Amino acid sequence: MTKENPEAVVWPAGYQINPRHQSLAQDLITAFADIPVAVAGDCMGRSVGAMGLRSYHGGKIMCGQAVTVRVRPGDNLMVHKAMMMAKEGDVIVIDGGGDLTQAVIGGLIRTTALTKKLGGFVIDGAIRDLAEWAEGEVPVFARGHTHRGPSKEGPGEINIPVAVGGLVVQPGDLILGDLDGVIAIPAESAASLLPKTLAHLEREAKIRETNLNGTSDPERFDAILRGKGLPV
């Protein structure tokens, strides 16, 4: 605490633990679980989302709100604390600085995640115990893997803005992940984005139908070419 604010917590250097985010409506989160990452990305400008991460669990969809963690590369002390704070369905998003020399999480953490019914993990860092993750029950996206395990010494921070694979994630953002990649939807934008994604899916379904029937309109592309001064 401080003289100016007796309720404020003074953290040791390198440590900070902020409260869990405000929850979005569960029906909104459930609705987004049916939205492909590519569709959400198209509706957000097509140039957003993490780069350089891969799925280690197969094709199970990830959809949940972010509990963010920044750790010293190769250390997972604050990951354990974040999991203690997380609620069912939350996704633990870990900024590990892209380090691949030590795994940040492994099979034992996966067991805890199963027990707590967490939504999964997104890690700018490494994992280990790949055979367990490959069972597919807990979504995990990571930059890489190694057999070398983590330390538990700190420091670290929880529920602060982090970056994973070039994607900025705020605490409480809605995280979507599928075989195409991972994207973060700002919590305050989720409700307004959902109808846009549904409309996008409907448009794609119509285009797909014309493509399958061989009745797609070439004039659509000719108009684009003409707009660029190209012959059609």
Image (cartoon, rainbow, N blue to C red):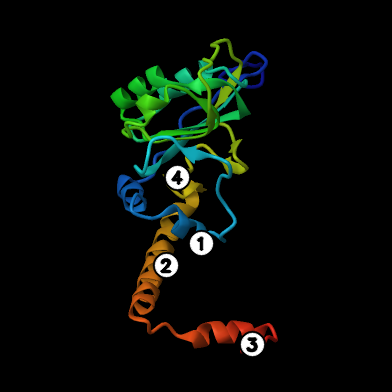
Can you tell which of label 3 and label 1 is closer to the viewer? 3
First-in-chain label (3 vs 4):
4
Amino acid type, label 1: Asp
Local SS, label 1? helix
Local SS, label 4? strand
- Circle 1 Cα neighbour tier, 10 Å, few/some/many (<14 / 14–19 / ≥20): some
Q: CA distance from mark 1 to mark 4?
A: 16 Å
Relative depth, front residue between 184 and 187:
184
The residue depicted at 42 percent of the width and 22 percent of the height is 129
First-in-chain label (2 vs 4):
4
The residue depicted at 55 percent of the width and 12 percent of the height is 151
Q: Quadrant of residue 126?
A: top right
Amino acid type, label 2: His
First-in-chain label (2 vs 3):
2
Viewer can see residue 91: no
Which mark, residue 118? none
Which mark, residue 42? 1
First-in-chain label (2 vs 1):
1
The quadrant in which the N terminus is found is top right
Q: CA distance from mark 3 to mark 4?
A: 40 Å
Residue at the disc numbered 4: 174
Q: CA distance from mark 2 to mark 3?
A: 25 Å
Can you tell which of label 2 and label 4 is closer to the viewer? 2
Viewer can see residue 58: yes
First-in-chain label (1 vs 4):
1
Q: Position of residue 136 (x, y in %)?
A: 33, 34
Residue at the disc numbered 3: 226
Amino acid type, label 3: Arg
| Label 2–label 1 contact, CB within 8 A | yes
Local SS, label 3? helix
Which mark, residue 200? 2
